[in-house]
Amino acid sequence: MIRDIARAVALATLALMAACRAKPQADHTQSGSLIPAIVAGTPVVARMGSAVVTQAELLDACRRARDARVEDVLARLVDSRLLAGHALAQGAERDRQLHQFRQTAMVQELIDQQVYRRFDEANLPEPVRQRAHATVGFAMAHSALMDVVHALAVVRPNATPRERSAAQSLAERVHATLIALPTPRTIETITAAIRAMAPASALRVEAVEQFDDEGRSPQGTFHPVFARAAADLVASNDVSPLVTTPFGVHVIVLQRRGSALVADPAEVLRREQIEALRLARARRMLDFMSQLRANLHVEVLGQDTDPHAARP
């Protein structure tokens, strides 16, 4: 049997080399890999007894494998089509350990097809890219980090025009008060100066720390309009104009500005893509397993059930 396997692999390799020498043109797949054309006169690229791998099967497998080398694709076809087929014909499927291994391989191939090959760097969902940029990208490189205190005249999502107008008027009074407030303008002095203007449900004072001009921070991502307005402040104690976001109307006071973190942009992008790919595949895996659970009935044994009792 070993001689038969060696002969099959040798035949496959020779056929592939002959095909590539005879016709060096390449077929470009969508991911950019090159598939050597197979000569029309040699339809069989690997043989073991009466079982064969044809040029069409190899080409189709190369297209589905995308960036894999032709030699690797052919080796997998020889393994799965010729060698495994020969083993099954010899009764290897009766070997329990081999049967379990085959089942595991089938599950892994299913996951590979449904999860891992579904995404590459070219087709990652934009929300996933943004999340990777906000986490991995921020940890590697960012502009000068800021600490601010902001007063927020709250506007509810379903607020009426009258309520919105009242919030705008409140923010204008807050702004005038903070402009007149002596420095240093800290969260304590700001709170003391404006807390009598409105109840806490309508007017909040909050500290926001360690975020960059894109709004990225270790705690999460802040609204970009808020972040850009804070970035326009130059010195500590500077007060921003009124800033409107979906949460309401803000008045921002800069507390301090730190230093920037610099890294190679190409390396940052590469790491962001790796993280985005991991996130996309993890999300797809959860969805895939949820679909399996919804479509397949699995009986879960109670905790009192002895899993060894049913064994012979």
Image: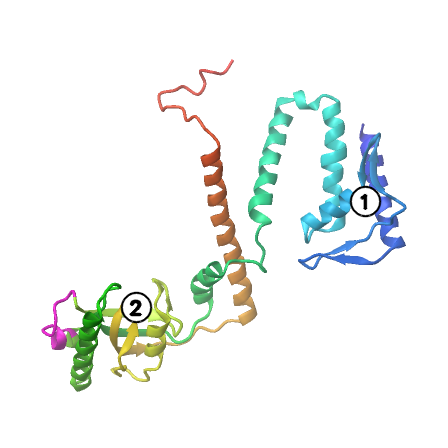
Task: Name the image quarter holding residue 225.
Answer: bottom left
For the rendered model, the colour scheme is rainbow
Q: Nearer the viewer, residue 247 or 215?
A: 247
> The residue under label 2 is which amino acid type?
Pro
Residue appearing at x 85%, y 57% in the figure = 24
Q: Position of residue 98 (x, y in %)?
A: 64, 27
Local secondary structure at mark 1: helix
Q: Which mark is residue 55?
A: 1
Task: Name the image quarter holding residue 232.
Answer: bottom left
Residue appearing at x 68%, y 48% in the figure = 64
Q: Residues within 10 Å of mark 1 (few under 14, many from 20)?
A: many
Tell me the quarter of the image containing the N terminus: top right
Disc 2 marks which residue?
A: 246
Residue appearing at x 77%, y 45% in the figure = 58
- Whole-number angstrom distance, CA of label 2 to CA of label 1: 60 Å
Q: Position of residue 163 (x, y in %)?
A: 19, 70
Q: Is residue 22 above or below residue 240?
A: above
Task: Name the image quarter holding residue 48.
Answer: top right
Local secondary structure at mark 2: loop
> The residue under label 1 is which amino acid type?
Gln
Q: Which residues are magenta?
A: 191-201
